[in-house]
Image: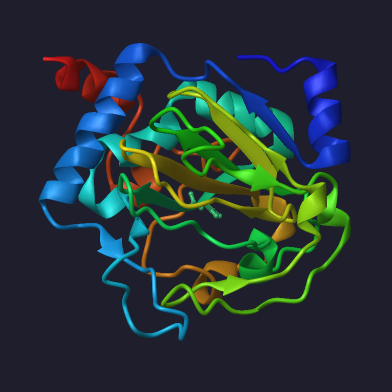
Amino acid sequence: MAFTPAQIQQFRTQGYLTIADFWMKEEVAAMQAELDRLRRDGRLRNVATDGDGKTHSQTQSNLQLCPMSPHSALFRALPFAPKVIEAVRQIIGDPVVLHLDQVFLKPARHGAGTNWHQDNAYFGISDPLKGTAMWTAVHDATVANGTIRVIPGSYKEKLEHSRDPQSDHHIRCYPDESRAVPLELPAGGVAFFAYGVAHATGGNGTDKDRAGAAYHFLNGDVIGADYFQQHNPGMAHPVLSGPYASDGTREYGQPIAGAWEREVEQAAG
Ligand SMILES: O=C(O)CCC(=O)C(=O)O
């Protein structure tokens, strides 16, 4: 897993990059099957509201599970996959720390988007290029089914955010959408975008579900020792690279190396 200098340059200047074939077919199938299970088990929650930020919509659905890792061995193992660690460290540098993991599922015909925001409006790190989302298209993600859009270079601006009236807990901003670039990806494709890059997804009116699994990683050197007491406490934040990486042992009490490959193989039966 090695990015070309041009890809790294694109991340540094535009704040994002995409890889269409990051995950293999079996890995995508495992993610899809696990997401189906989590949905069947009632783990996903509709966060879409009717315009007042409170009343849950009966007609629109933005199904979220955040974090996934306590509920799923597969999704807990995913950030330990060697190609994930290698990709992220090339983008933000060591030490890579997992910040958050979540999924948004947009059901067929009534899937709701996630409105414009910069992750750094939540996360508040000092350098908005030192944290990155890794957004996996769990199903083919197209303009028609509301794939993610980004505003290139927007990490240079700190946009004003307010409560999102279409979600029960999100905040949103209102950037100039004429600058937006849609990132169409086949299932298994990945978009990396920096904490400062404004992004949004759209509704899904097609006849197939679409989901995006979003992992957030930051460079541990840009945060203070008490950062995770204020930001996303109550979940593990494994150190994935650098001298303090322990292969999950420190954070989960057991080594995670090889777990991703095992989980994928198991899912394939
Ligand atoms: O997939 C989505 O709807 C939104 C993902 C997102 O905004 C994020 O992970 O920050």
Which quarter of the picture shows residue 34? top left
Relative depth, front residue between 172 and 129: 172
Compare residues 112 and 265 and report the one nearer the observer.
Answer: 112
Percent coordinates x, y for residue 156 in the rendering: 88, 56
Whether residue 238 is situated above or below residue 258 in the rendered picture: below
The foreground one among 107 and 247 is: 107
Left or right for 80, reference 114: left
What residue do we see at 78% from left, 23% from top? 7
Q: Which of these two is toward me, 168 or 142? A: 142
**In the picture shown, does residue 69 fall above or below 141?**
below
* Residue at x-position 35% and y-position 48%: 105
User: Left or right of 221: which side holds 29?
Assistant: left
Q: Position of residue 220 (x, y in %)?
A: 65, 52
In this rendering, position of residue 18 left or right of residue 213: right
User: On the rendered image, what quadrant is the C terminus found in?
Assistant: top left
Residue 29 location, quadrant: top left
Specify whether residue 242 is in view.
Answer: no
Rendered location of residue 32, percent (x, y)? 27, 31
Figure quadrant of residue 264: top left
Q: Position of residue 189 (x, y in %)?
A: 52, 24
Inspect this view and state whether residue 202 appears: yes
- The N terminus: image quadrant: top right
* Residue at the image position 32 percent from the left and 73 percent from the top: 57
